[in-house]
Amino acid sequence: MLPFQNMTGDPEQEYFADGIAEDIITMLSRSQSLFVIARNSSLIYKGRAVDVKQIARELGVRYVLEGSVRRGGSRARITAQLVDAVTGNHLWADRYDRDRVDIFAVQDEITEAVATAIEPAVAQTEQHRAVRKPPESLGAWEAYQRGLWHMGRIGAKENEAAKGFFRRAIELDPSFASAHAQLALAICYGGSTYQVMSLARALDEALPVAHRAIALDPLCAAGYISMSSARFFQGDHEGALAAARQALAISPNYATAHHYLGTRLLFGGRPRDALDPIRKAMRLDPHDPLQINRLSQIGIAYYFLREYEAAVGAEKEALRCYLDHPLAYRWLAAALGQVGRLEEAKQAMEKLMAVAPKSVDMYVRQRAPWMRVEDYEHMLEGLRKAGWDG
């Protein structure tokens, strides 16, 4: 992260440019997946025209964030761009025009916007780089990135591939906490979302791996997310909620942690409170391939609140992102049943039975451990109206 250039022509505005750069460094440093050079090391380049490739060599980094600040009257314009210093390619750039009425509020807003955009841009580039390499040539970090890539593509086979790459990363580096954390999550998904194994077996496998992630690095936010996932699938709402909050305390802009906080509130009997953290997760990482789950869970929140038309709209939006997602079909059918749109409800129920019959056994014929009895009965009420008679 280079110091932002003061283009205002006013030396007294240096503090504004330096403040933005310092705040961005502080926020990016909270990320579990980014190695961020300290402010004092980057300050040596202030006011110097230095090639980004040279900076990357000297600091031992791959990505360089640079920017500038201009002012016109009461308006400020801040630009920022992220550069792959090895290839010279621009990965991301944006411009922010703001009134400088409250300079600290502007500084905070720009800082959050830039920091929120950087991590997904770097993650996407790293994953694509790992995918282009032969599997046998991958190092631990690259195997981990390849695992994340597969995990985000949705599907039982992709999830199994992800587990294989996370195990490869752990084999190459047994102290890699994040690889342990993501492996635990993938195992949980195998039991809950994809039903390739029983939930009990998935928890037996995942819990020790999640504990290991936290033991290796008590500041690994992903480790607490994997623990939150396992506790949730056990039906331990308080434990799951506490772990999600711990992840957020470590990494306040971690989209998955906001999502998990919302999910724990949703199924813990607080659907109204769940909406804000789920929506914040969507804002923080709008291109997350697992956004389908967040969209559907907004629909579930509306269903629990008995706002059934809103639930229908949210579930249909989710299905536009992923046409065969069983979670969305189940709640769409229930919501359509509640509003009396019975022909549509029947079609949604038939689609659910066609794409995910195992999920009907696990979540409809039985009550999942994290579903409260009253929520389960409420769901069944809608599904029966939709034509389910199992």
Image (tube, rainbow, N blue to C red):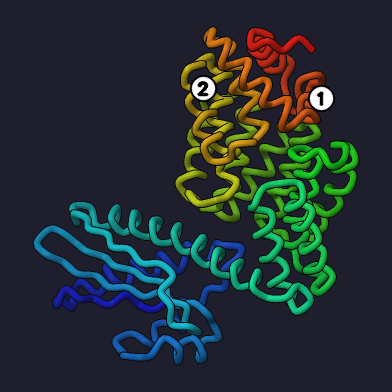
- The image position of residue 383, as x and y in percent, is 67, 14
Q: What is the crowding at mark 2: few (fewer than 14 residues within 10 Å), some, or many (at least 20)?
A: many
How many numbered circles does the render carry?
Answer: 2
Q: What is the crowding at mark 1: few (fewer than 14 residues within 10 Å), some, or many (at least 20)?
A: few
- Residue 188 sits in quarter: top right
Look at the image and tell me in which quarter the C terminus lies: top right
**Tag of residue 312:** 2
Sequence-wise, which precedes: disc 1 or disc 2? 2
- Residue 97 sits in quarter: bottom left
Q: Given contact means CB atoms under 8 Å apart, are the residues at marks 1 and 2 in contact? A: no
**Tag of residue 166:** none
- 353 relative to 258, above or below: above
- The image position of residue 199, as x and y in percent, is 85, 37
Q: In this view, does 358 lie to the left or right of 78?
A: right
Identified at 28% across, 55% down, the residue is: 106
Q: What is the CA distance from the residue labelled 1 to the residue labelled 2?
A: 23 Å
Task: Please name whichever residue, 159 or 236, is drawn nearer the observer in this view of the structure.
Answer: 159
Identified at 43% across, 82% down, the residue is: 88
Q: Is mark 1 on a helix, strand or loop?
A: helix
- 39 relative to 288, above or below: below
- The image position of residue 31, as x and y in percent, is 56, 62
Whether residue 369 appears in this view of the structure is no
Q: Which amino acid does label 2 sit on?
A: Val
Q: In this view, does 304 lie to the left or right of 155?
A: left
Q: Name the residue under label 1.
A: 361
Q: Which residue lies furthest to the left in this view?
A: 73
Q: In this view, does 106 lie to the left or right of 100?
A: right
Q: Is mark 2 on a helix, strand or loop?
A: helix
Identified at 37% across, 71% down, the residue is: 81
Q: What residue type is labelled 1?
A: Asp
